[in-house]
Image (cartoon, rainbow, N blue to C red):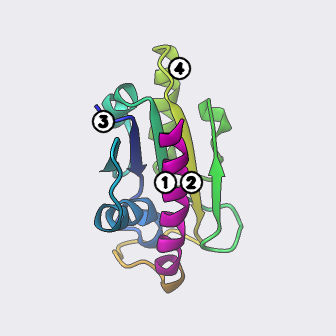
Amino acid sequence: MNKILILGIGNLLMGDEGVGVHVVRYLEKNFQWRGVDVVDGGTGGFHLLEFFQKYPIIIMIDATIDGQPPGTIQLLKPKFSSDYPPTLTAHDIGLKDLLDALYLLNHQPEIWLFTVSIARLDQHTIELSQGMTKTIPILAEKIDKLVKTLLED
């Protein structure tokens, strides 16, 4: 079993909201690490519980509508669902419920969360905005740096 899971969360049918999934696809094509798995987590929810129980370290990527300029990247280390930004996009209820379930099961992996600011939810487009497309390699480099640091520990 690998030590780290990189989990991209997002809905590909809603434009920039799918950035987490686009990032993991980019990572799969451009990076390889020993001890790391990369997974498209879709819109989150309880079907991801198995992953959260299996990996001691999880790096998640998700979009947020937080008023910051689109493409703003933040790295958080939340422990409880209440520590997550209230502005995570449409699927956050399932993800937060999942994290509460892990707490109740007394199984909490180390979670790192990269949020990417988006301007709005776009219905029925699989295309990222031009600005978001430019953000993906920048975020991928930040993830690579974090992975290398975590693998050294």
Q: Distance between the residues labelled 2 and 3?
A: 21 Å
The answer to which of 32 and 136 lies nearer the viewer is: 32
Residue range corresponding to the magenta coloring? 132-153
Residue for badge 1:
61
Q: Which mark is residue 103?
A: 4
List the residue tagged with mark 2. 114
Looking at the rendered image, the quarter that the C terminus falls into is top right
> Are the two marked residues, 4 and 2, in contact with CB atoms closer than 8 angstroms?
no
| Front label number (1 vs 4) | 1
Left or right: where 35 falls relative to 104: left
Residue that sits furthest to the right in the current view? 67
Ranked by sequence position, the earlier of labels 2 and 1 is: 1
> In this figure, what is the number of numbered marks?
4
Residue type marked 3: His
Q: Kindly identify the amino acid type of the residue bearing the numbered disc 4.
A: Tyr
* Residue at 37% from the left image edge and 62% from the top image edge: 27
Instruction: Tell me the mark number nearer the camera, choosing from 2 and 3.
Output: 2
SS assignment at label 1:
strand
In the figure, 116 relative to 96: above or below? below
Q: Which tag is nearer the camera, tag 3 or tag 1?
A: 1
Mark closer to the chain start, 1 or 4: 1
The residue that appears at 36% across and 76% down in the rendered structure is 125
Q: Is mark 3 on a helix, strand or loop?
A: helix
Lower position in the chain sequence, tag 2 or tag 3: 3
